[in-house]
Amino acid sequence: MKTNWLFLIGTAASACAWAQTSEEKITRELAFEAKTASNTLMTLNINGSVTVEGYAGDKILVEVKKTIRAKTAARLEEGKEEIQLGVTDRADTLILYVTGTCAPFGKQSRKDWHRKFNGWGYQWNKNEGRGCEDRYDYTMDFVIKVPAGTQVVASTVNQGDVEVTGVSGAVVADNVNGAIRCAGISGATRAATVNGDVNLDFSGNPSGDSRFYTLNGDITANFRKGLAAQLAFKSFNGELYSSVEEITALPVQLEITDRGGEGTRYRVNGNRYKIRQGGPLLDFETFNGDVIVREK
């Protein structure tokens, strides 16, 4: 009986950790002012999931579930006021992000600025912004519909997965503590996470060079019958498995990485293969995980 009481007390204490909770749905309807073949939607989140779906319309339909948790009503109201949806309109590119965080968002040329997404990102510097007081917890879960031909950049860091479906444009999917799922895609694709699996299902084989990476997880990639590509594989503790029969190993390649005072530095690129007659490069890398390449 004592054990049961201790369990109940511990559970109650955990439930009271965030005594105040607020949920709000944010909706926006957007459109590209300049309609081109390179129209791009960038969604750069911090806490929460990002789901992007291609459809037959011409609008960007945005729905965000904002959740704030705090230990007092005053801190809850502070979070509700500060955490908001940010939108930057670059005519042919729309950028969605989170405002009110301790990391200001924007584009600068400083070396310490987050450069992963063409210079756009959050400035992770605790001496700036509001100081990262952690007075409340928040998540922003994005669900977005885009015209099917849109190029998509979708990223988050914590507390959510990244999912992109039904788009024919190039895809960049990025995560840190979560999985990546892409289905019904056909453009050049870059998918990378640290802690999570990467699952890819192509409706048409990639039209350009693509890279797939996870540190702690597996990569499963399903391509269409008749795949023609070059394939690179690198892993510390993982293996490569493939159902593709027409695959041959390529000779080891030397890549020049530096010409310094002590001489020329080379990198040896092994584990390269050609599928059928070759084509775009499909670059797979894991540390603790396997890679599975299939044709369907």
Image: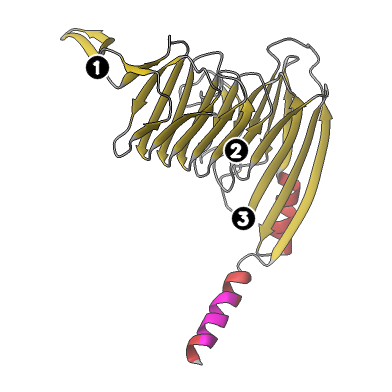
**Element type at mark 3:** loop
For image coordinates 58% across by 48% down, the residue present is 159
**Element type at mark 1:** strand
The residue carrying mark 2 is 162
State the image coordinates of residue 32 (x, y, percent, origin top left): 79, 18
The residue carrying mark 1 is 268
**Is residue 259 inside the magenta stretch?**
no
In the rendered view, does 137 fall on the left or right side of 174? Answer: right
State the image coordinates of residue 163 (x, y, percent, origin top left): 62, 37
Q: Disc 3 versus disc 1: distance between alpha carbons?
A: 49 Å
Pointer 3 or 2: first along the chain:
3
In the rendered view, does 228 fall on the left or right side of 238? Answer: right
Query: Which three-letter amino acid code belongs to the residue tagged 2?
Result: Val
Query: Which three-letter amino acid code belongs to the residue tagged 3?
Result: Arg
Near-viewer residue (257 or 73)? 257
Q: Nearer the viewer, mark 3 or mark 1?
A: 1
Pointer 2 or 1: first along the chain:
2
Residue stretch rendered in magenta on the structure: 4-11
The rendered magenta stretch, by its main secondary structure, is classed as helix
Q: Disc 3 versus disc 2: distance between alpha carbons?
A: 27 Å
In the rendered view, does 13 fall on the left or right side of 61? Answer: left
